[in-house]
Image (tube, helix red, strand yellow):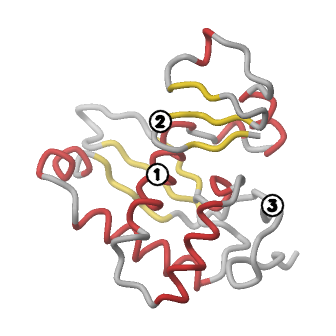
């Protein structure tokens, strides 16, 4: 297992690895093996998921949330499987004829509205504190919430307020 904090991977054996050094050192648990265990390797954008996780961890301290909700989100984002709570995004290519790049967000089938709303508050908090350059870069990507739901299973140790088993 691994956990990402500020562009650094921390492995279960206590070792760590700076981003970009994955090919230089053998980890105790290979990233590919871990992602295959999650069964969503084909839609997984490693960098994008970890960027979301990092900015949400930063935003939880700055967001205007009730203390109870803040503690819930801190606990959720501190779990070793916190990345499994991030929504999937499928990218389309960027081109002259297509305009800005589009990312289709696949809502999580098992996600409760409480978690969805708290993530929206964290995202808005992050966007409000972005500098001009970050806002300009973010404007180059159009995010569309898709109708197709993600097929990912509910994460292990998912709190009842955050998710529920989907109905078949």
Mark drawn on residue 153: 3
Q: Are marks 2 and 1 in contact (CB under 8 Å)?
A: yes
* Percent of width and height locating residue 85: 64, 62
Q: Nearer the viewer, mark 3 or mark 2?
A: 2
Q: Image point 55% across, 89% down: which residue?
A: 68
Residue 66, numbered circle: none
Alpha-carbon span between mark 2 and mark 1:
9 Å
Q: Are marks 3 and 2 in contact (CB under 8 Å)?
A: no
Q: On the rendered structure, is 101 left or right of 40?
A: left
Mark 3 crowdedness (10 Å alpha carbons): few <14, some 14-19, many ≥20: some
Task: Check the image and name the residue furthest to the top.
Answer: 24
Quarter of the figure with residue 109: bottom right
Quadrant showing the C terminus: bottom right
Mark 3 or 2 closer to N-term? Answer: 2
Identify whether 93 is placed above or below 105: above
**Crowdedness near tag 1: few (<14), some (14–19) or many (≥20) residues, C-alpha within 10 Å:** some
| Mark 1 vs mark 3: in front | 1
User: Residue beneath label 2, please?
Assistant: 7
What is the C-alpha distance between the residues marked 1 and 3? Answer: 22 Å
Q: Residue at x 36, y 76 (%)?
A: 63
């Amino acid at each position: 297992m691994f956990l990402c904090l500020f562009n650094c991977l921390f492995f279960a054996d206590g070792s760590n690895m700076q981003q970009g050094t994955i090919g230089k050192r053998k980890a105790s648990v290979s990233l590919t093996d871990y992602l295959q265990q999650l069964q969503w390797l084909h839609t997984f954008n490693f960098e994008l998921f970890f960027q979301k996780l990092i900015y949400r961890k930063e935003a939880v301290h700055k967001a205007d949330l009730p203390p109870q909700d803040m503690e819930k989100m801190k606990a959720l984002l501190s779990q070793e499987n916190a990345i499994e709570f991030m929504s999937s995004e499928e990218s389309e290519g960027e081109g002259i004829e297509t305009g800005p790049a589009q990312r289709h967000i696949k809502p999580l089938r098992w996600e409760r509205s409480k978690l969805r709303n708290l993530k929206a508050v964290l995202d808005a908090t992050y966007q409000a504190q972005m500098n001009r350059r970050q806002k300009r870069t973010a404007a180059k990507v159009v995010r569309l919430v898709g109708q197709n739901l993600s097929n990912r299973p509910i994460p292990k140790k998912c709190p009842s307020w955050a998710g529920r088993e989907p109905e078949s």
